[in-house]
Amino acid sequence: SRDHFFLGTCAEFFYSHLCGIRKVRDGCKHVTIAPVFYPELESVGAKLQTIRGELECSWKWEIDGQGKCDGNGCENKKVILRLRVPNGSKAQIHLPACKIEVLEGCEGLRDDEGVLQAVSGTYLFCLRFL
């Protein structure tokens, strides 16, 4: 049967898809972050205690200025994404096509052909979907 606990759980889905903590390798020396932003969810967050310290990824939807919501969704919505990379770790951050504004942590960040590379530290992003 493929219905065994070790083949996948709800908790693993929350960490790997909603929060995007996908690949933690080499004692958390390298980690891949690729969250999925569901408009039906207001916010998501997860912390993972690793040998190098706490790895955290969380995000929440916000409405800009005079944005309004109705039965067809919201206009002027943005995602605020917070990421904490433990000491001695590096993260590859995969984000969907959007306008990315770095609010905190830009000194440890590098863009490598559409994939953000981050060293240990705390990062805060504002993502606006076009």
Image (cartoon, helix red, strand yellow):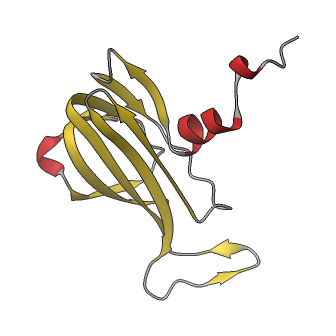
- Image quarter of residue 80: bottom left
Q: In this view, does 116 lie above or below 124?
A: above
Question: Would residue 33 be visible to someone looking at this image?
Answer: yes
The x and y percentages for residue 47 are 43, 45
Residue drawn at x 20%, y 37% is 120
Residue toward you, 86 or 118: 86
> How many callouts does the rendering have?
0
Q: Is 49 on the left-hand or right-hand side of 122?
A: right
Q: In this view, does 75 lie above or below 27?
A: below
- Image quarter of residue 3: top right
Q: In which quarter of the image is the N terminus?
A: top right
Question: Would residue 113 be visible to someone looking at this image?
Answer: no
Residue drawn at x 32%, y 14% is 26
Q: Is 56 on the left-hand or right-hand side of 5?
A: left
The x and y percentages for residue 29 are 27, 22
Residue drawn at x 27%, y 36% is 53
Q: Is residue 45 above or below residue 13?
A: below
Residue with the most extreme top position = 1
